[in-house]
């Protein structure tokens, strides 16, 4: 079992729809959770981080964390074609000495 | 100017050659990392350094070595390049002192080993 798993995708949504990206992790003691966006051929950049159970909103983006279910998600409301990218989930837990473990990413395409 | 820079941006080399990828940062972060990314895969950690005197292997360190010349510089070497080391390589920094340990990535080096 991978430490961090994401839906392999690709995920396609129409413009204006809600895109839902999911990530599960195996280390129950994990404490920090990150979503990065990576455009094709570019480097990853942080969208959001979340530490506490519940929702965290930033503009059109909402991160949701459920530690009991070991699940973190990213919702993108009013999806735009410019949101088309690969989204990487990263987790920091006690067993990886403060390093981020990345999932393989989910590729999102927003169709006009 | 970019906070995290990588040189070269693209490199084509032949099997058996020794090459070095360089990373510099102006963010003042203590932590630096080298990752490789293959198509359809996430980021896999090669080496990391939490300060100048601290070097640690990541999950795929075989065939690679690193040098932390200063807080701002972290170099990755392929002693004898092989074709399956063809990949996109990213350097990253982080500063746990900011409370988030967010990773800041360089632009990447695309390496092709023939």
Image (cartoon, coloured by chain):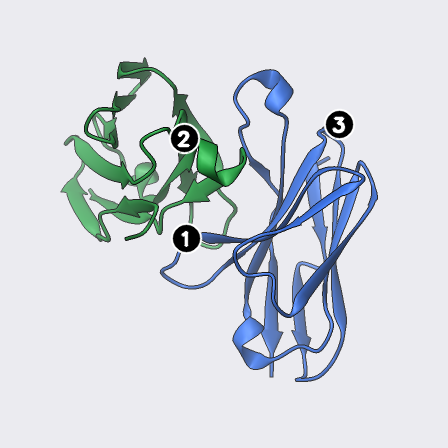
Chain colours: A green, B blue
Residue hosting label 2: A34
Badges 1 and 3, same chain: yes
Q: Are marks 1 and 3 in contact (CB under 8 Å)?
A: no
Q: CA distance from mark 2 to mark 1?
A: 14 Å
**On the rendered structure, is B66 left or right of A89?**
right
Residue at image coords 30%, 40%: A26
Q: Are marks 2 and 1 on the same chain?
A: no
Q: Residue at x 35, y 52 (%)?
A: A104
Q: Provide the secondary structure element on which disc 3 rests.
A: loop
- Above or below: residue B33 compared with residue B113: above
The 10 Å Cα crowd at callout 3, few under 14, some 14 to 19, many 20 or more, is few
Mark 1: few/some/many CA within 10 Å (<14, 14-19, 20+): many
Side of A33 relative to B68 (left or right): left
C-beta proximity under 8 Å, tags 2 and 1? no
x and y percentages locating residue B59 in the rendered image: 52, 56
Residue at position x 49%, y 40% in the image:
A96
Report the chain holding disc 1.
B
Q: Which residue is mark 1?
A: B42
- The Cα–Cα distance between marks 1 and 3, rounded to whole angstroms, is 26 Å
Instruction: Say if B34 sits above or below A77 in the image.
Output: below
Residue pointed to by mark 3: B28
Q: CA distance from mark 2 to mark 3?
A: 22 Å
Of all chains, the one bearing label 2 is: A
Element type at marker 1?
Answer: loop
* Vertical placement of residue B42 versus A53, above or below: below
In the figure, is residue A53 to the left or right of A91?
A: left
Q: How many marks?
A: 3
């Amino acid at each position: 079992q991978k430490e961090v798993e994401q839906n392999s995708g690709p995920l396609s949504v129409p413009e204006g729809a809600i895109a839902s990206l999911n990530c599960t992790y195996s280390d129950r003691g994990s404490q920090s959770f990150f979503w990065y966006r990576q455009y094709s051929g570019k480097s990853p950049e942080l969208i959001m981080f979340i530490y506490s159970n519940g929702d965290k909103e930033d503009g059109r983006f909402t991160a949701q964390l459920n530690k009991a279910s070991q699940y973190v998600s990213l919702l993108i409301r009013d999806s735009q074609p410019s949101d088309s990218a690969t989204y990487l989930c990263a987790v920091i837990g006690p067993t990886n000495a403060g390093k981020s473990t990345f999932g393989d990413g989910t590729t999102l395409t927003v169709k006009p | 100017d970019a906070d995290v820079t990588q040189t070269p941006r693209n490199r084509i080399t032949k099997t058996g050659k020794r090459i070095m990828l360089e990373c510099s940062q102006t963010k003042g972060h203590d932590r630096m990392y080298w990752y490789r990314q293959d198509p359809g895969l996430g980021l896999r950690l090669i080496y990391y350094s939490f300060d100048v005197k601290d070097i640690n292997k990541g999950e795929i360190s075989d065939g690679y070595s690193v040098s932390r010349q200063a807080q701002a510089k972290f170099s990755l070497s392929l002693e004898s390049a092989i074709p399956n080391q063809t990949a996109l390589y990213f350097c990253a920094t982080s500063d746990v002192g900011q409370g988030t340990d967010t990773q800041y990535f360089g632009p990447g080096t695309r390496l092709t080993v023939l």
